[in-house]
Image (cartoon, rainbow, N blue to C red):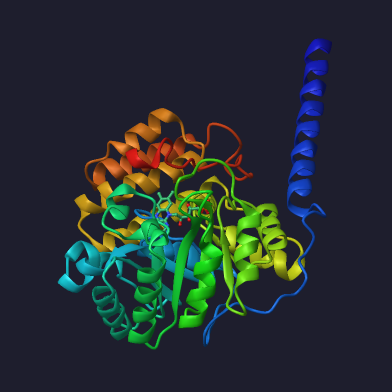
Amino acid sequence: MKCHYYRACHWLLFCIVYLKLRLFIFKALMNSPLPSQPDPRPPVCYGRLQLASRYLLSPLAGYTNLPFRRIVREIGGVGLATTDLVNARGLLEGSPKTLQLIQTCPEDSPFAVQIFGNDPKLMSEAAQLLEARGVDSIDINMGCPVNRIVKGGAGASMMCRPDDTVSLVQAVVEAVKIPVTVKMRLGWDDQNLTAPFFAREFEQVGVVAVAIHGRTREQGFRGSVNHEGIRQVVEAVQSIPVIGNGDVTSIADADHMLRTTGCAGVSIGRGALANPWIFRQLVQWEQTGQYDPPGNFDDRLQLLLRQFRYLLEMTTEERAISMFRKMGHWYLKSMRVSPALRHQFQCAQNLNDFDEAVRAITAQGPLSGSRSGILPDMHIPVPGGPVERW
Ligand SMILES: Cc1cc2nc3c(=O)[nH]c(=O)nc-3n(C[C@H](O)[C@H](O)[C@H](O)COP(=O)(O)O)c2cc1C
C-alpha cells in the first residue's frame, strides 16, 4: 500500500517537473529576449507596388503551387509569393502543364510569376502575356543551377554572359508596365562573384528589386550562405530593394540575414515548407518582439487536408494524389508521423486510400511530442552532390 503511495507521488512529481520543463523551454524559445525586435525599417516597394511585409515566399519548383500559396497566405505575413520557374516558351505555346503553374485566385495576391529562357523576344512576349492576365510582377530566373536549364542558356548560366543578359533583362522591362525583378545567385563560382555587377546594371535598366540566394552556382546547395556576398550586392545598388535568401528557417536566421547584409527583405523557401507559420511569426516579431508558436500536430493535419482540397479543385483525383506526395512527405515528417503510416500515405492510389491513411494518422498522433504541443523542429534537406547530376 505504502509502496503504491510512494510510486504515485513519484509519478506526480515527475509529471509536474516534466510539464514545468516544457513550459520553461516553450517560454525560452518563444519569448527569449534574443533576437530583439528589429528597428523600424521602411516597407519594401517593388516600384509602385508596396509589399505588405518584407518576408517573401521563395519559388520552390514542385511545391510553391497555388494550393501551397493559398495556405501560407491564409496564415498571413507573406509579402509576396512567386510561382515555380515557368518556361517562357511553354507559356507562349499554351502548354497545359505550364498554364497550371500560373493558376491563381484573388486571395493569391500580390502574385509574381517567375519565367526562364534565353531569348529576349520570347521572354518579353511571355512577360506581356502575363501582364495581360493580371499578374502583379514578373521575376526572371537567373539562379537555377540545374543542368537541364543551364545547358539551354537560361538560369544561372546567364551570369556568364553579362552583355546578353543585361540586354535580355532590359527587353523584358521595356516590354511591360508591371514591375520586373531578378532572382540570382552570387555568381557562377567563387572566382566570378558577379551579382553586385548585375544588380547595378539591372537597376540602371529599370529592374525594381533583386533577390540573391547567397551561394554560387558551383556550390549548388553545399556550404553555408555567404552573407558578406549579399551585403556587397546591397552596397552595389543605389535604391532598389535587395532581398536576401538562403537557409532562413527561424526568426533568428531572418534577423541575422537582415542585420548582417542590410537587405530590405528576406525570401524563404524550405523554411516555409517546414513551418508555414514562419511569415506570420516574423511579422509578429517585427511588430511586438514576440511571436506565437507554429501550429501543432492537429493544426498541421488541418493544413494538409485543406491544401489537398485546394489541389483537388485544380486537377483530377488521380493527379492530385500523385502531385501531393512530395508535399505530404514534409507535412508528415514535420508532424512526426510514424514511418509505417507515412508509407501508407505515400502508397495511396485513390481518395479511399488517402482518407484511410489520414484516419490512421489522426488516430495515432505524433511519435514524439504531443498532439497539442510544439513539435520538434524539422530541417528540409536540399539536393546533394554535384549540381551536374541533379
Ligand atoms: C526543391 C527546390 C526547388 C526550387 N525551385 C526554384 C525555382 O523554381 N526558382 C528559383 O528561383 N529557385 C528555386 N529554388 C531555390 C529556392 O528558391 C531558394 O533560393 C533556395 O532553396 C534557398 O532558399 P531556402 O534555404 O530558403 O530554401 C528551389 C530550391 C529547391 C530546394
**How many labels sit on residues?**
0
Left or right relative to 99: residue 140: right
Taking depth in this image into account, of 242 and 342 the one nearest to the observer is 242
Q: Which quarter of the picture shows residue 116?
A: bottom left
Image quarter of the N terminus = top right
Q: Residue at x 38, y 65 (%)?
A: 83
Left or right relative to 3: residue 103: left
Whole-percent x, y for residue 320 in the image: 26, 53
210 up-or-down from 309: above or below = below
Taking depth in this image into account, of 299 and 311 the one nearest to the observer is 311
Q: Residue at x 71, y 59 (%)?
A: 260
Left or right relative to 39: residue 156: left
Image quarter of the C terminus = top left
The answer to whether residue 294 of the structure is visible from this angle is: yes
Left or right relative to 160: residue 318: left
Taking depth in this image into account, of 309 and 202 the one nearest to the observer is 202
Whole-percent x, y for residue 212 in the image: 53, 61
The answer to whether residue 264 of the structure is visible from this angle is: no
Whole-percent x, y for residue 138 in the image: 39, 75
Instruction: Report ligand 1 position as a quadrant.
Output: bottom left
Q: Residue at x 63, y 68 (%)?
A: 234
Q: Which quarter of the picture shows residue 229?
A: bottom right
Whole-percent x, y for residue 310 in the image: 34, 62
